[in-house]
Structures are given as structure tokens and as C-alpha cells.
């Protein structure tokens, strides 16, 4: 007896997910190849600027609640994360190279590796540390974690100066949990429920434009 076919809706979602993953693989591979030279120069600058590793690795929450260790260029002094996981205003822990890398968002480029490994997508909700995911409302958490986290999304574009906003808060930790995080979650939920490849391409170009015009 032949197996029943998938419903059109399930088939469409499966096809969309496959197309998104294929786009991620092609774009991330091309990006790493084209940017190999500049990325090596940035790595050398980080090593010369301050002692410590080139990459900053931190546990984040991925799709389905799975934990993974993200790749970012190190922008802070080593072993200073114990002072807090939020970067607020003109944080003294940030290195000289790190200030430029953060401002230009170049510190995010190593996440192309995470895209290749399948932990992330080019576009999607930004991956949070477990500490802040614990503050997601249950129904929101299920929606946000139903898709791979991404390097960029609308929240990243429209809240690009988040650390400066927190720097003006009397209690940055509370401001993040009560003000910034709920706004981010609104973007995350809308993306998870309505995303498409065309929307991903729009977000990628909007991100590049935002960085150039800063």
C-alpha cells in the first residue's frame, strides 16, 4: 500500500525550509571565501591588540532549545564576562580593536561558520544566552525557538544601538529584561511566523545598508 502524501501546507513548509537552508549554505560559503583575506587581517589585529584568543565562544540557545557555542571575533578583555553578559555604553572591558569591530558589526562575521554547521541561519531571531531565554513567556519561547537563530533580523537593524540605550539606564539589566527584550521578542515572533526567502534577502540588504550608513 502506498504511503499517504504530505498535505500541501506541510510540503510547502518543508520546501521553504530546504530552500532557506540551501540559500544559507551557498551564501555563507561564498561569504567565507570572499572575505577570507579581510577576516585573517582582523584576526591578526585582535591578536596584536590584546592577549587572548581570536574568537569569543559563548553558549547560546538555538532551534528547539538546543545549546550551541557561537563564534564571534573577541572584542573584550579575556575573562571579563563574569562582570556581566550585557555590554553597556562605553564598556571599559571592550578592547581598542573591539570598539571598531562592534561599531562596524564585523565581530559578527565568524557566525558564518555557525551557519555552515547548521546551528544558525543568515537571517533569524538573534540567539540569546540561556539566562535571558528563561525570561521568554512560554508561548513566545516555543514560537521563537521553532526556527534557527540568525546573524541578523529586523530587531538587529532597528535596535542596532542597543548598548548605548542600556548605557543611559539606571539599571541596565532590568531595562534589558523589561524593555528591550519584549520589543525584540515582538520582532522574533513575527519573523518566525511569516518568514520567507524574499524577506530574508530584504533583511540582508537592509542590514548592509544600515551598517554602511552608520
Image (spheres, rainbow, N blue to C red):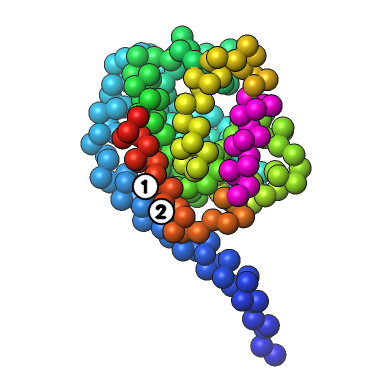
Marks 2/1: CA–CA distance: 6 Å
Residue reaching furthest left? 37
Task: Give the residues drawn in magenta, as a range.
Answer: 176-190
The relative height of residue 23 versus residue 89 in the rendered view (above or below) is: below
Report which residue position mark 2 lands on.
201
Residue 82 is covered by the magenta coloring: no
Magenta: predominant secondary structure element? Answer: helix
Question: Residue 136 at x, y = what percent?
Answer: 71, 37
**Residue at horizontal 59 percent and vertical 44 percent from the top:** 188
Q: Which mark is residue 121?
A: none
Q: Quadrant of the N terminus?
A: bottom right
The relative height of residue 101 versus residue 202 in the rendered view (above or below) is: above
Q: Secondary structure at mark 1?
A: helix
**Residue at horizontal 23 percent and vertical 36 percent from the top:** 37
Report which residue position mark 1 lands on.
205
**Residue at horizontal 63 percent and vertical 24 percent from the top:** 176
Question: Residue 53 at x, y = what percent?
Answer: 40, 22
Question: Residue 22 at x, y = what percent?
Answer: 43, 60
Q: Quadrant of the C terminus?
A: top left
* Left or right relative to 99: residue 130: right
Residue reaching furthest right? 138
* Left or right relative to 196: residue 54: left
Q: Nearer the viewer, residue 5 or 144?
A: 144
Question: Residue 211 at x, y = what percent?
Answer: 35, 34
**Residue at horizontal 46 percent and vertical 31 percent from the top:** 160
- In the rendered image, which quarter is residue 132 located in? top right
Residue 25 seen from this side: no
The reply to whether callout 2 and callout 1 are in contact (CB within 8 Å) is: yes
Amino acid at each position: 500500500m502506498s504511503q499517504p502524501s504530505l498535505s500541501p501546507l506541510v510540503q510547502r513548509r518543508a520546501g521553504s525550509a530546504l530552500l532557506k537552508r540551501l540559500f544559507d549554505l551557498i551564501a555563507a560559503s561564498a561569504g567565507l571565501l570572499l572575505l577570507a583575506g579581510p577576516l585573517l587581517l582582523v584576526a591578526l589585529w585582535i591578536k596584536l591588540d590584546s592577549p587572548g584568543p581570536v574568537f569569543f565562544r559563548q553558549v547560546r540557545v538555538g532551534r528547539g532549545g538546543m545549546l550551541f557555542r557561537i563564534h564571534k571575533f573577541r572584542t573584550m578583555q579575556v575573562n571579563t564576562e563574569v562582570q556581566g553578559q550585557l555590554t553597556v555604553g562605553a564598556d571599559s572591558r571592550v578592547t581598542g580593536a573591539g570598539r571598531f569591530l562592534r561599531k562596524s558589526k564585523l565581530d559578527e562575521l565568524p557566525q558564518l561558520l555557525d551557519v555552515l554547521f547548521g546551528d544558525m541561519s543568515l537571517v533569524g531571531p538573534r540567539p540569546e544566552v540561556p539566562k535571558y531565554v528563561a525570561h521568554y513567556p512560554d508561548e513566545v519561547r516555543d514560537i521563537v525557538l521553532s526556527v534557527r537563530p540568525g546573524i541578523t533580523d529586523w530587531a538587529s537593524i532597528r535596535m542596532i544601538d542597543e548598548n548605548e540605550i542600556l548605557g543611559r539606564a539606571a539599571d541596565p539589566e532590568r531595562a534589558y529584561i523589561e524593555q528591550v527584550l519584549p520589543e525584540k521578542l515582538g520582532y522574533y515572533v513575527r519573523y518566525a511566523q511569516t518568514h520567507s526567502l524574499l524577506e530574508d534577502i530584504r533583511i540582508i540588504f537592509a542590514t548592509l545598508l544600515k551598517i554602511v550608513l552608520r
